[in-house]
Amino acid sequence: MPYRTIIEPFKIHTVQAINFPTLQEREAALERIGYNLFGLNGAEVIIDLLTDSGTGAMSSKQWAGMMDGDESYAGSRSYYRFRDTIKDITGFAEIIPTHQGRAAEKILFATMVSPGDVVPNNTHFDTTRANVEYQEAEARDLVIAEGKDPSSMHPFKGDMDVAALERTIEQVGRDRVPLVMVTITNNSGGGQPVSMANLRAVREVCDRYDIPFFLDACRFAENAWFIKQREEGYADKTPREIAREMFSLVDGCTMSAKKDGLANIGGFVGLNDPDVARDCRNLLILTEGFPTYGGLAGYDLEAIAQGLEEVLEETYLQYRIRSTAYLAEKVSSAGVPIVRPPGGHAVYLDAKAFLPHIPPHQYPAQALAVELYREGGVRGVEIGSVMFGRPKPDGSEEPAAMELVRLAVPRRTYTQSHIDYVGEVVIAAAERAEDIRGYRITDQAPWLRHFTARFAPL
Ligand code: F0G
């Protein structure tokens, strides 16, 4: 089309009302929840950018599929539709449904990983890391150096450092590396894509050492779109062809259908090795359910099968990646520092640069996240020293590498004017940055403290 504006490729068919708590109500809520935005009631949030996981809008075809879901305990027709759709996209022989991504991780790692092993990834997502560590193995992040630099404009900042991968295998020994994983897109590294060339290079190393290669494929369609836009030789390929090529380079994947499955719940393991698949299914029966539903209702399987078709449509992906870039442009053109270039599913505000007067041990990203809520009822999430700070023996804390606030964009949920509003809220908070104060923690859990910690303003 000759027009500049990329429009939402859908009409709105059902709407859900947004509440508008007043400034006074928002301040009262902040005090009540100890300044931890995980404690908010959804009804207290005006625009919710906490996560893009399970928060998207489903299509009329997905809802229609749900009405027609087959709830047979064994051999549900909806399972066969789910399986065949995923086989068609990925080419994997064995498709194992799970209730969400971390269940797929738990089952795969419990089957393949042993104590003392090392699992390389570009950057482990936190549940992926936790599931590796739960097997008493080490989760090692090997993203390229540009992937850790918020200002580097490298087109594929999610790429794995292939030389570091080889060094790791040489150093720990092939027998202690049960699989190599690459996360597409690299969520913990800013939602940055991985190139096909990098996947091919990792495949080549895995072949040389005979190590299985898996994708954490949560945002595979967004990754395919970036390859189409940025990598030579892919401009004329469809997202589906690109996805198929990515999956053809690996032995299997874990997937959270709450992202690029365009569903509110669900996930799967896909793989080729029948022995590993059998062991995974045996565990699945113990913890998730029979292999033709894996912890999901028949109607969920329908929603995912349809969602996986829709997520690969070019009009959808163009709109999707554009809407994230639009928010990034809006805030960065007003001088707000962000991780660049913007990722597929989220904009990451750089709180260290935004609030240079707040030192890491006073949690600048937490302070910024709180301020966005106070200012305009916008909920993002801290990805900084609250989430990743490590206690030192002397009682102080090792800060995180970056202090970020992630504004994750739910799929097909907010319109351009919602995003314009978010931009205005961020810019209004930026205008009074010098007045924003840090926080101290008053109460925290021994692990994953970011979910429940309470704070007090300094
Ligand atoms: N892998 C990646 C890269 C993820 O981003 C997530 C979830 C998971 C695995 C786990 O999937 O939630 O279905 O169990 N990410 C969400 C987020 C929670 O907000 O980024 P799950």
Image (cartoon, rainbow, N blue to C red):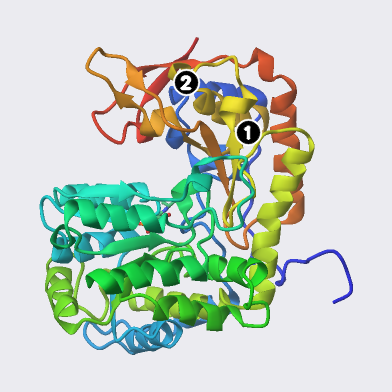
For discs 2 and 1, the disc positioned in front in the rendered view: 2
Q: Which mark is residue 21?
A: 1
Is 25 on the left-hand or right-hand side of 69? Answer: right
Ligand 1 rendered quadrant = bottom left
To which quarter of the image does residue 19 belong? top right
Residue at coordinates 47% horizontally, 24% vertically from top-left? 35
Q: Residues within 10 Å of mark 2 (few under 14, many from 20)?
A: many
| Residue identifier under label 2 | 360
Quick one: 289 or 161, which is closer to the camera?
161
Q: CA distance from mark 2 to mark 1?
A: 31 Å
Where in the figure is residue 97, as x and y percent of width and height? Answer: 30, 74
SS type, badge 2: helix
Asked if one can make out residue 235 in the rendered structure from this viewpoint, the answer is yes
Is 18 on the left-hand or right-hand side of 40? Answer: right
Q: Is residue 409 above or below residue 361?
A: below
SS type, badge 1: loop
Where in the figure is residue 313, as x and y percent of width and height? Answer: 62, 78
Residue at coordinates 14% horizontally, 48% vertically from top-left? 136
Q: Is residue 126 above or below residue 229?
A: above
Where in the figure is residue 232, as x and y percent of width and height? Answer: 64, 73
Q: Is mark 2 within 8 Å of ligand 1?
A: no
To which quarter of the image does residue 434 belong? top right
Quick one: 422 or 11, which is closer to the camera?
422
Q: Is residue 365 above or below residue 239?
A: above
Quadrant containing the N terminus is bottom right
Question: Mark 1: which amino acid?
Answer: Pro
Q: Residues within 10 Å of mark 1 (few under 14, many from 20)?
A: some
Where in the figure is residue 312, as x and y percent of width and height? Answer: 57, 77
* Residue that lies at the very extreme toward the right in this rendered image: 2
Quick one: 153 or 379, which is closer to the camera?
153
Residue at coordinates 46% horizontally, 75% vertically from top-left? 246
Question: Mark 2: which amino acid?
Answer: Pro
